[in-house]
Amino acid sequence: DSGVTQTPKHLITATGQRVTLRCSPRSGDLSVYWYQQSLDQGLQFLIQYYNGEERAKGNILERFSAQQFPDLHSELNLSSLELGDSALYFCASSLLGQGTDTQYFGPGTRLTVL
Amino acid sequence: GDSVTQMEGPVTLSEEAFLTINCTYTATGYPSLFWYVQYPGEGLQLLLKATKADDKGSNKGFEATYRKETTSFHLEKGSVQVSDSAVYFCALYYASGGSYIPTFGRGTSLIVHP
């Protein structure tokens, strides 16, 4: 158990809809990362937050947004969903978001867009 | 930005065989290097890491040495077990504008037969 929790585990929705994925980091970790994992694209970094502030952006679509709250949990919002957004979405946390930090991954949310 | 390249899988071995999974990187500096493992149905977890050149990371019988001359961080294990069947990811962070962007290889699937 990494100490990172993600909800829900599974999500099935339709094209055009909007969903919110939730992540609680490991106790004491200040930084949260979001990733998308699909068979064709591999593991893609989406966005990173540190102590409530956006720290780095990866391949995140404009239809996607995220935030980190004062209690350090984070939410990833996906809107105008398309079939191609079906994937596993992982959240990870690390202590300070530094280049030597170990990331601790949650179990993931499997999103299916029909 | 910096990147990592892993050998493509799947790698299929018999129990007790020797394992090597190749990873090479391109980087402007000397990033920390990581190996993560993903067991079926789970999130990634750190296997080992090395933070500077010539460092050797090791864990659970796996080893990898940070070689700046060959820009490599190959993963090795002397005798694999069925329980090592998983997907292995090589990773680094690259520095960009004061933040550290995580970059993962595409993953190498390992299948170990009894």
Image (spheres, coloured by chain):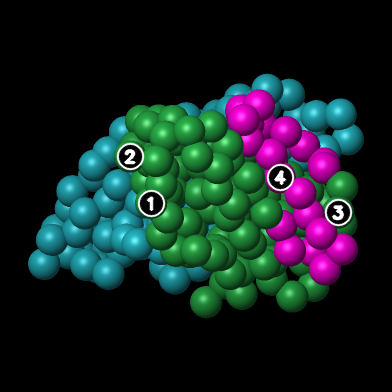
Chain colours: A green, B cyan
Chain-order first, disc 2 or disc 1? 1
The answer to whether tags 2 and 4 share a subunit is yes
Secondary structure beneath dot 2 equals loop
- Residue segment shown in magenta: A54-74
* C-alpha separation, residue under disc 3 versus residue under disc 1: 29 Å
Q: Amino acid at mark 4?
A: Ala
Which residue shows up at 50% across the image and 63% down it?
Answer: A8
Q: Nearer the viewer, mark 2 or mark 4?
A: 2
Chain-order first, disc 1 or disc 4? 1
**Is any part of residue B87 visible from this angle?**
yes
Residue contact at pointers 1 and 4, CB within 8 angstroms? no
Q: Amino acid at mark 3?
A: Gly
Chain-order first, disc 3 or disc 1? 1
- Depth check, front residue: B69 or A34: A34
* C-alpha separation, residue under disc 3 versus residue under disc 2: 33 Å
Q: Label 1 lies in what chain?
A: A
Q: Position of residue B105 (x, y in %)?
A: 48, 36
- Depth check, front residue: A74 or B50: A74
Which residue shows up at 69% across the image and 71% down it?
Answer: A26
Write down the residue under mark 3: A52
Chain-order first, disc 2 or disc 4? 4
Write down the residue under mark 2: A114
Secondary structure beneath dot 1 equals strand
